[in-house]
Amino acid sequence: MKKSGFGIIGLGRFGMSMARVLSEAGEDVIVLDQDEEKLREVRGYVHEAFLAEKMTKEALAECGIGECATVIVCIGQQVDVSVLTTLHALNLGVPRVIAKADSNEHGIILERIGAEAVYPESETATRLAAVLMGSKAMDMMKLNGDYIISEIKVTKRLYGMKLDDLNLSKYDLKLVALEYEPDKTIIDFEPDEILEQEDAIVVAGRFIDIERFERKVVNGA
């Protein structure tokens, strides 16, 4: 049976952000945590939320973690628990396991056992979620709350269109800049500016709105 959806283990600030961003983007998300109060915060928008007092292999399997296509282990400070939980997810046959690392040494251990390590100090949950969902965003910068600035490469579908044709206001997005040719950025642009191959647009808005714009306009899904 084909595995699908995301599993998030640990609801600290990073795990909470991952759960919210992925769920708001329409992804199926299973979360596990040892704190019932934290689980109550996410039950309104995730697919399923489970209380797991100990992150044993049996507990993870019972909650359906083994059926996920991607699992993100957001346990950082307890290195032993983080590594063991990551190993359990890998042994359950999860194709892609990503784990939060609080240090370079922690990250090296995670990668040695077969996981991908991320460092929340440099990788925001929003950026990671965009990567996991195949976003066309070339780069992102997190602002306050759910707001980000995102650089999006112009696809073939948009070649020859005018900036005004993008209808960014419909998606509650604001055009910040237009990038064209190598290393040229303009912030004073006209609505009838034509989009060309290799161009990129820089927009500001909520991650969920940028993802919706990419899906419907940039990719034509």
Image (spheres, rainbow, N blue to C red):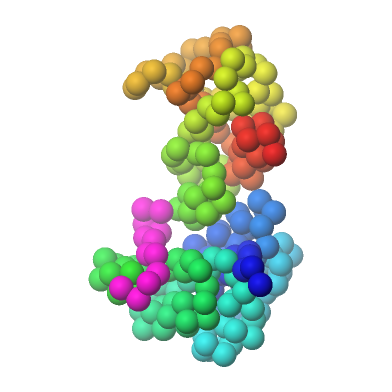
Identify the main secondary structure in magenta: loop
Q: Position of residue 142 (x, y in %)?
A: 48, 44
- Residue under the point 58% across and 77% down: 66
Residue placed most toward the observer, 160 or 137? 160
Quadrant in which the N terminus is drawn: bottom right
- Residue under the point 50% across and 31% down: 153
Q: Is residue 97 above or below residue 129?
A: below
Q: Position of residue 186 (x, y in %)?
A: 44, 16
Q: Position of residue 181 (x, y in %)?
A: 39, 18
Magenta span includes 148: no
In the rendered structure, the answer to whether residue 164 lies left or right of residue 106 reads: right
In the rendered structure, the answer to whether residue 181 lies left or right of residue 8 reads: left
Residue placed most toward the observer, 176 or 129? 129
Q: Give the residue furthest to the front.
A: 1
Q: Is residue 115 above or below residue 52?
A: above
The magenta region covers 112-123
In the rendered structure, the answer to whether residue 190 lies left or right of residue 86 reads: right
Q: How many marks?
A: 0
Picture quarter containing residue 221?
top right
Residue placed most toward the observer, 65 or 171? 65
Picture quarter containing residue 190?
top right
Q: Is residue 93 above or below residue 202?
A: below
